[in-house]
Amino acid sequence: MPDSAQTYSIQFETTKGSFTVEVRRELAPVGADRLYELVVARFFDGVRFFRVIDGFMAQFGIAVDPKVGDKWRTARIPDDPVATSNSRGSLTFANAGPGTRTTQLFINYRDNSQLDELGFAPLGKVVAGMDVVDQLYAGYGEGAPQGSGPRQDRIHAEGNDYLEREFPKLDYILSARILEPTEA
């Protein structure tokens, strides 16, 4: 990420339409830098929204190809302190405890401030197209074994082949690109 860029925007084209996220490095610099790196590497192209829970959040970020995922799964990044709350539309890295952030993110559907004290540090916010995010397919709900949605271990092992075969209604990202800044 260019050192001078403290804010950047990402255009996500999805099967439901497009939405734009504004990322503010001051909120979570380590997370903002990792997200930039992932977008530039085209990591999210084809990635499914595999865990969409109405009234809570939409999660994505497991690689389409397990070989690509293997590289990133071990590339953990340090935690950022929580500088702003998990409000509606905020984008946050998922984690499985301290020091476990890699590639998975979620977009909050509502005020999820209870996540703040658990260390989930938002790094940006949907600034256009939240109506698109609201339409992502949520019929599968929570992932297995707690719910009937996809198993993360199988997504990691089998990639999109597993999701296309067993969860064909999942929406996905067609492309994610950094938007060039515009002159004011």
Image: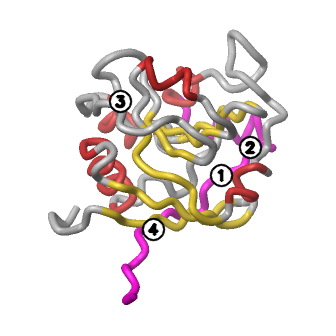
State the extent of the magenta-drawn residues as a range: 158-184
Whichever of labels 1 and 3 marks the residue nearer the N terminus, that label is 3
Query: Is 169 inside the magenta-drawn segment?
Result: yes
What residue would you read off at disc 1? Answer: 172
Mark 4 nearby-residue class (10 Å; few <14, some 14–19, many ≥20): some
Query: Is 116 inside the magenta-drawn segment?
Result: no
**Which residue is depicted at the point 70% across and 52% down?**
133
What residue would you read off at disc 4? Answer: 177
Q: Is residue 20 left or right of residue 42?
A: right
Q: Nearer the viewer, mark 2 or mark 3?
A: 3
What residue would you read off at disc 3? Answer: 101
Could you say which is closer to the camera, residue 52 or residue 87?
87
| Three-letter code, disc 3 | Arg
Q: Is residue 54 left or right of residue 23?
A: right
What residue would you read off at disc 2? Answer: 170
Check contact, mark 3 vs mark 4: CB within 8 A: no
Tell me residue 40's x, y (percent): 34, 62
Task: State how far apart marks 3 and 4 are (Cα).
Answer: 21 Å
Task: State how far apart marks 1 and 3 are (Cα).
Answer: 21 Å
Task: State how far apart marks 4 and 2 are (Cα).
Answer: 21 Å
| Secondary element type, mark 2 | loop
Task: State how far apart marks 1 and 2 are (Cα).
Answer: 6 Å
| Secondary element type, mark 4 | strand
Mark 2 nearby-residue class (10 Å; few <14, some 14–19, many ≥20): many
Check contact, mark 4 vs mark 1: CB within 8 A: no
Whichever of labels 4 and 1 marks the residue nearer the N terminus, that label is 1
- Where is the C terminus found, in terms of image quarters? bottom left
